[in-house]
Structure formats: structure tokens, C-alpha cells
Amino acid sequence: MKIMDTLVVRLVLAALLAFKAFDDFFATALTLVYKMNVTGAAESLGRLTAGDDYSRFVPLMEAVPVWLHGLWVLAGILYMVAIVLVVGGFGRAHIPVLAALALEIVANVAGRPIIETTGVVVNPNPSVIITVVIPYLLPLFLALALSRQTPASKATAR
């Protein structure tokens, strides 16, 4: 029996994928509730940011173009697809994870000049976990682990 064939392991991996999806959806969700003038929701989401206040991100939310939000949302959707694949035991969940990582890298490279022009410091004291582990190493680890998953139909045929 392979470890990736156990439901508990797949659920743990799905939880990590859900974290990455939330990470990708967060900026867009905060921007949407801010632009829709839903102050209560913006304040609630703002409590999840560094400094617990969304108001310092207003210049950034005004400057980020829709296409950049589209990249983040698409990456989040790919993580959700990977969740369905891994929990269902279908295999090949590493492919949408790698595609989501690629979109995140493109969004990061394209968004960096926009962030710099606003002068907003998103995280004033970034750690290695925030700058390297979560955005790059976690998805690579997940993709590696998920590449070891055998589709349920092949696993039962053995």
C-alpha cells in the first residue's frame, strides 16, 4: 500500500492546497469588498493582513489591474481543481499545482513594479517562510508528493 493511497494523507495535502487557494483568492476578495464598499467584510478580511488593517492597502487595491487579479484567481481555481483530483484519488493533481505555481510566478513578476510604484509595503518584515517557503517551496513539495499518487482505478487493479 502506498502512502498516497490513504485518505488521511490526501486530506492533509488537500488542506495545504486549500491554504494556497485561499492565499491566491485573498487579495482579489479584499479588493472586491473594498470596491463594493462593504466595510464590515473589508475590516474582517483586513484583520488577516499584517497590521490588522486594510486601509493601508487602499493605494495598492486601486493600482492593481484586473488582469493581475485574474491571474491570482485562475491560480486559485487550479489549486481547487487539484483538491478535487487529490481527494477523489484521480491522480495527476500535480499538473494543476505546477500550473498554478507558474501563474503565481508570472503574477509576482508582473505585479512587482505595480506594488513598487504605489509605495505600499505589503509585509514590512518578511521572513523566509513568507518570501520563499509558502510561495515556492510549498507548491513544489505538494507537486512532488502528488506526482506519487496513483489513480484510484489503477491502485485497486493491483
Image (cartoon, grey):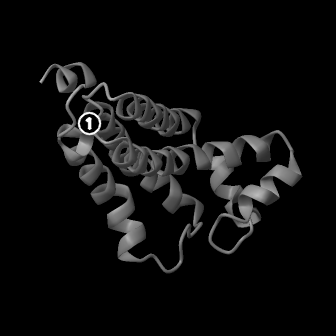
Name the quadrant of the C terminus. top left
Q: In the rendering, at what x and y percent does residue 140 appear?
A: 25, 51
* Front position in the image: 151 or 64: 151
Question: Measuring 63% from the left and 55% from the top, which residue is drawn there?
Answer: 60
Which quadrant of the view contains residue 88?
top left
Question: Measuring 72% from the left and 56% from the top, which residue is drawn there?
Answer: 45
Is residue 63 toward the left or the right of residue 123 in the image?
right
Most extreme residue toward the left is 158
Q: Secondary structure at mark 1?
A: helix
* Front position in the image: 142 or 107: 142
User: Crowdedness of circle 1 by 10 Å Cα count: few (<14), some, many (20+)?
Assistant: many
Is residue 43 toward the left or the right of residue 134 in the image?
right
Does 101 appear above or below 80? below
Is residue 4 toward the left or the right of residue 113 in the image?
left
Q: In the rendering, at what x and y percent does residue 96 appear?
A: 32, 32
The amino acid sitting under disc 1 is His
Which quadrant of the view contains residue 4?
top left
Question: Measuring 16% from the left and 19% from the top, which residue is drawn there?
Answer: 157
Pointer 1: what residue?
94
* Front position in the image: 82 or 91: 91
Which quadrant of the view contains residue 98?
top left
Q: In the rendering, at what x and y percent does residue 23 appear?
A: 52, 51
Most extreme residue toward the bottom is 125
Is residue 70 toward the left or the right of residue 83 in the image?
right
Q: In the rendering, at what x and y percent does residue 63 appear?
A: 62, 48
Name the quadrant of the N terminus. top left
